[in-house]
Amino acid sequence: MSRIGKKPIAVPKGVTVKIEGNTVAVQGPKGKLDTHLPNGIRM
């Protein structure tokens, strides 16, 4: 595994991140993004 994959990601103020199962939802001042993660990727 790469070392960069183990580093934390900084989330700016005003941005919320929800992780539910394999779905990640990110919402901020510029909009919202929902994405489904493939099997084998853990968060």
Image (cartoon, rainbow, N blue to C red):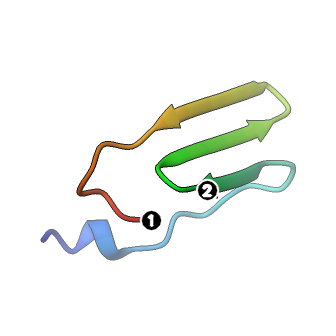
Q: Secondary structure at mark 1?
A: loop
Q: In the rendered view, does 17 fall on the left or right side of 5?
A: right
**Vertical placement of 23 versus 17: above or below?**
above
Say which amino acid is labelled 1: Met
Residue found at x 80% / y 37%:
28
x and y percentages locating residue 26 in the rendered image:
68, 41
**Vertical placement of 27 versus 6: above or below?**
above
Instruction: Tell me the quarter of the image containing the N terminus.
Output: bottom left
Name the residue beneath numbered marker 1.
Answer: 43
**Vertical placement of 15 versus 30: above or below?**
below
x and y percentages locating residue 19 in the rendered image:
61, 56
User: In the displayed image of the protein, which residue is found farthest to the left?
Assistant: 1
Residue found at x 61% / y 55%:
20
Name the residue beneath numbered marker 2.
Answer: 19
Say which amino acid is labelled 2: Ile
Q: CA distance from mark 1 to mark 2?
A: 8 Å
Instruction: Tell me the quarter of the image containing the C terminus.
Output: bottom left
Residue found at x 39% / y 74%:
7
x and y percentages locating residue 16 in the rendered image:
78, 51
**Mark 1 touches mark 2? (CB < 8 Å):** yes
Residue found at x 70% / y 53%:
17
Q: In the rendered view, does 43 fall on the left or right side of 15?
A: left
Write down the quadrant of residue 40 in the picture: bottom left
Write down the quadrant of residue 32 in the picture: top right
